[in-house]
Amino acid sequence: MRRRIILAIACVLASLPVRVDAQAQPDSLDRYRGLDSLLTEFYTALQPESVEAKNAEFDALISTCHDSLTRQHVTLRILDHYMHSRVMGEEGVAIHIYDKWLEPGIVKATSEFELMDAELFANCNRRSLIGMKAEKITLRKPSGGTMTIPEDGKISVLFFYDTSCAKCRLESMALPSVLESVDFPMNFYAVYVGYDKRQWRAFRRNFKLKGMKNIRLVHLWDPEMDSDYQIIYGVVATPRMFVTWSDGEIIGRRLEVVNLQQIIDYIKIVNGTQEEKEVPES
């Protein structure tokens, strides 16, 4: 199926007339409608593939666009799709497209704002992708001391929130019911990104994980923003939630509560499989 789509895209590219006037594009939507439809099919066909495989496919596709306007259109469509993809881990494709095609100027963005938006996305996501080792950040405790997270040896959740964020409040209300199913050791780091001590104190007083013996809840913040958590973990909006394995590998990023439940279920399966392997045959 994927090869069929590639051939169809190649045919569409070959049939497109060459445009030399970058300003005269009144029929651009009609011109690229068929191509955009095929690109949508291509995204779906590539979904099971690794980020590296997707990158190679899109590099080859963009390279076949000899008309600069068509190359620009295809590149920016791919970039936009993967910047807003809801499939965890696919952000890496958007970063690759920016690094290879836009940043060196091989393909031009349609505006300075569009280029800045792509650059911000790439720089705020490239250090916390799936499979990477989570960078450690040092934050402040309510008592005034510091802690460097994520600590080694335990599965961890990093939950970046703001008390003024309505979605953060909703997520924090739903989190306890999800976390009560955790049956393995876990650190839960609730990281406040605001500056109001009273609001933070009120949140800590209300956000409890009572009776959850497997979970260690730690409240932290960084009012001076010395840790660079914003750029390291891409916290340009809240909430932001990450899950790291006991060895520090990032296994979940930009999660919502429903996704966290899926990660927890996955960890249970992995732990159960490991336990079964450790049981000697009688």
Image: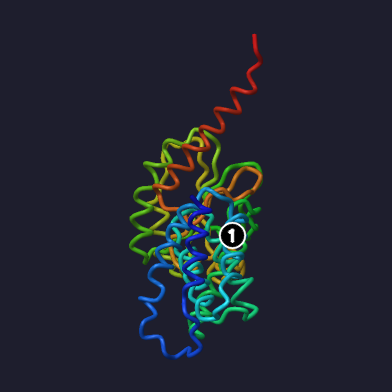
Residue positioned 44% across, 64% down in the render: 84
Q: Nearer the viewer, residue 24 or 104?
A: 24
Residue positioned 48% across, 40% down in the render: 264
Q: Nearer the viewer, residue 46 or 96?
A: 46
Q: Amino acid at mark 1?
A: Glu
Vertical comparison of 224 with 93: above or below: below
Q: Position of residue 235 (x, y in %)?
A: 51, 65
- For mark 1, give the secondary structure: helix
| Quarter-of-image position of residue 228 | bottom right
Quadrant location of the C terminus?
A: top right
Q: Nearer the viewer, residue 81 or 176?
A: 81
Q: Position of residue 157 (x, y in %)?
A: 52, 49
Vertical comparison of 282 with 126: above or below: above
Vertical comparison of 205 with 36: above or below: above
Residue at the limit of the structure toward the top, as seen here: 282
Residue positioned 47% across, 75% down in the render: 16
Q: Position of residue 204 (x, y in %)?
A: 42, 54
Instruction: Please state if 148 lies on the left or on the right of 207 as rendered.
Output: right
Which residue corresponds to mark 1? 57
Residue positioned 58% across, 79% down in the render: 107
